[in-house]
Image: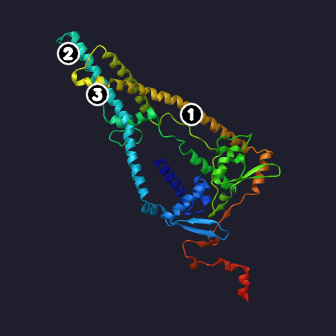
Amino acid sequence: MEAGWRNMMEVRERILKAVEALNYRVTVGDVSASSGLELALAQQGLNTLAQDVNGHLQVSSSGEIVYAFERDLRNRLVRNDLRSKLVVLARQVWKALFYVMRISFGILLVLSLLVIAVAVFVILTSTRGNDDQGGGSDRRDPGFAPSFFWFDPWFIFLPPDAPRQARPKRMGFLEGVFSFLFGDSDPNADLDERRWRTVGGVIRNQGGVVIAEQLAPYLDKASTENEDFVLPALVKFDGQPEVSEQGDIVYRFPGLQTLAGEQSNERAPSFLQETIIPFSQAGSGNLALAAGLGALNFGGAWWLYFLLQNASLPPELQFVEVLLPVLLLYGTLFLAIPAVRWLILQQRNSRIRARNRTRSEFAQLLRTLNTQLRQKLDYARLYAQRKVIAKDDIIYTTEQSTLEQRDYELDDPRFKELEGR
């Protein structure tokens, strides 16, 4: 249920952005092309939005519908929609909780190292004291403890080269530990949205009619052997194929041929490019520090394990023996998880490069038009059109009652003849 609510809010946000970008007066085709949503979903979302914020429906003389909204659209939505307020609050709480979770792994690493260092130090000093049989000289090595415990606490929260008493502008050490372990957010998380927004723009720029080769640089599983890869675009934007006498197929999208106002063509990228996923967005210094401390923690945990086979800790440190399995598991996983993740990333990035290369090749094919492609494009232009619904075309709007609006049937020539008599 939570996933469904989250998806609904994401759809509404995409529709809001499209309405704002198109100056608060849109058709269903406008929103579908701008947001990358299916026509049916854009239709449903616009109806719901118009109901929630008292939007207006305008009907042209040809029966086309335009949705008109006030410019304080978001303010109205927040005032009238309690769920939106709850979502904003939930996002703030989640942001704080997620930050605590991110830094907790770094804190655990530091605590683990402290516990291991204290336990090893106690075992070594007690063993050395027993060997000396209480000799007069103090054999404790004062260099070990200070080198580990005497550190600037700001170093944990700030990057290595950050100025003291300055708010960190980049990822600090604690967040860097989380990034080293689990990576960061997927840079291609919005790939599907970018794909359909671009495809919608390409179709709209071409007058609502395209050939398969024009969509191939943006769709997956594109092939020169068949045009099955176009089917997702047909479903998304309610398209239909048209076949010429020569057997060439073009794809017409009537819903994207109607505009609520004049719009300039936006330049689309030559192909849809996925971003290579980095191992981590943390700085190299933080990564080296996290890896080094992780290796030290791993080695220290196993060293403590072997020391405890022939020694024991004082009563006040007996809890360390209970925690030892956890320390061993944590130390091992701290190095194993990034190693496995690195191997998986190599495979994922290899597939990303392959997809980018394929889409780039289709874009290059489209730039070097051959006779067959020119013929298909010429046929597509026969169906291309852009119908703009101007305000003068509006014959009815929900802003006014029916009695207040002009009866456009009186423009019929038969009524004109009666008026002239």
- The residue type indicated by label 2 comes to Asp
Choose the circle earlier in sequence order: 2 or 3.
Answer: 2
- In the rendered image, residue 153, in percent from the top left (x then y), is placed at 31, 34
What quarter of the picture does the C terminus occupy?
bottom right
Quadrant of residue 47 in the image?
bottom right
| Secondary structure of the residue carrying numbered label 3 | helix
User: In this image, 139 relative to 239: left or right?
Assistant: left
Report the disc number at residue 401.
none
Q: In this figure, which residue is indicated by the disc labeled 3?
A: 149
When asked about the image quadrant of residue 79, the answer is: bottom left
What's the CA distance linking mark 2 and mark 3?
20 Å
Of labels 2 and 1, the one closer to you: 1
Q: Does the image show residue 278?
A: yes
Q: How is the image coloured?
A: rainbow
Identify the secondary structure beneath mark 2: loop
Identify which amino acid the numbered label 1 is placed on.
Answer: Arg
Mark 3 or 1: the one toward you: 1
- For label 2, count other residues whose C-alpha is less than 10 Å away and answer few (under 14), some (14-19) or many (20+): few
Amino acid type assigned to the residue bearing label 3 in the image: Phe
Which residue is drawn at the image coordinates 36% and 43% (left, top)?
167
Residue of label 1:
348
